[in-house]
Amino acid sequence: MNSFHLETGTGSSNIRIRYAGLLDYLSIWRAMKDFTDSRTKHTLDEIWLLQHPPVYTQGVAGKPEHLLYNDGILVIRTDRGGQITYHGPGQIIAYLLLDMRRLKLGVRELVRKMEAAVVDLLWDYGITAAGSAGAPGVYVGNAKIAALGLKIKNGCCYHGLALNVNMDLIPFAAINPCGYTGLRVTQTCDLGVTDGVETLSNRLAKKLQARIAGY
């Protein structure tokens, strides 16, 4: 994609990392589908790091009642798993475009690795976080800091995770985040982290490479 700056994977990883700025959701969704449809067995895996303008995305099994009221933000029904979540500036989006068969990864194992990468990142800043077996994502105490959702097609995945860094959290009040009534959300800037999106994106990319590639 012309909007992305390409950096090849580091260390023993064959996962390419692409960075972008603020890009609209529908364009990136189409790009992910096109990338996945055109893959061959030789296509390198990639992680795309970017941000989105304000948008709600509703998973394939998403229930409309989890949008509590319409605050004027676009709602897009997408093809990932999960319920409704919010994306906006100041949130890191990490889209994982992986050949899961080649990596010998099942869905549940990949989800755990994604959660672990975020937990590792937060641990570097002295923040204790954890995943949840019953509600995928990463939590600090009872507040969610990262949401996950994937689409699997022909043994490959796309979509990924969203990590709250320094964003307007008010739009979360219009939804039951990820389908959970009253679920609190938090972000790194409210937990004492002064590093911004760019630094955290770079560090998250390395954590994801390490967890997925197993080095």
Image (tube, grey):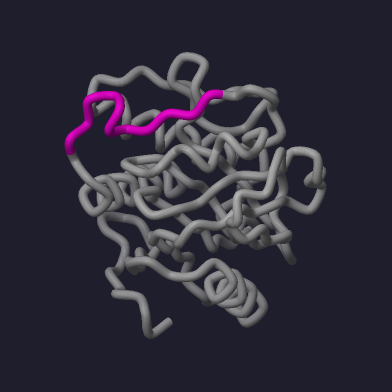
**Magenta residues, start to end:** 184-194
Residue 20 percent location from the top left of the image: 34, 68
* Depth order, front residue of 183/34: 183
Q: Is residue 106 above or below residue 50?
A: above
Q: Is residue 194 above or below residue 91?
A: above
Residue 177 as seen in the image, left or right of residue 46:
right
| Quadrant in which the N terminus is drawn | bottom left
Location of residue 41 (image quadrant): bottom right
Looking at this view, name the residue that lies furthest to the left: 194
Q: Is residue 191 above or below residue 173?
A: above
Magenta-colored stretch includes residue 188: yes
| Quadrant in which the C terminus is drawn | top left
* Depth order, front residue of 149/85: 85
Residue 133 as seen in the image, left or right of residue 16:
right
Residue 213 percent location from the top left of the image: 43, 49
Residue 72 percent location from the top left of the image: 60, 56
The residue located at (62%, 47%) in the rendering is 149
Magenta-colored stretch includes residue 156: no
The residue located at (59%, 23%) in the rendering is 132
Residue 49 as seen in the image, left or right of residue 24:
left
The residue located at (52%, 75%) in the rendering is 43
Looking at this view, name the residue that lies furthest to the top: 141
Q: How many marks?
A: 0
Residue 32 percent location from the top left of the image: 58, 71
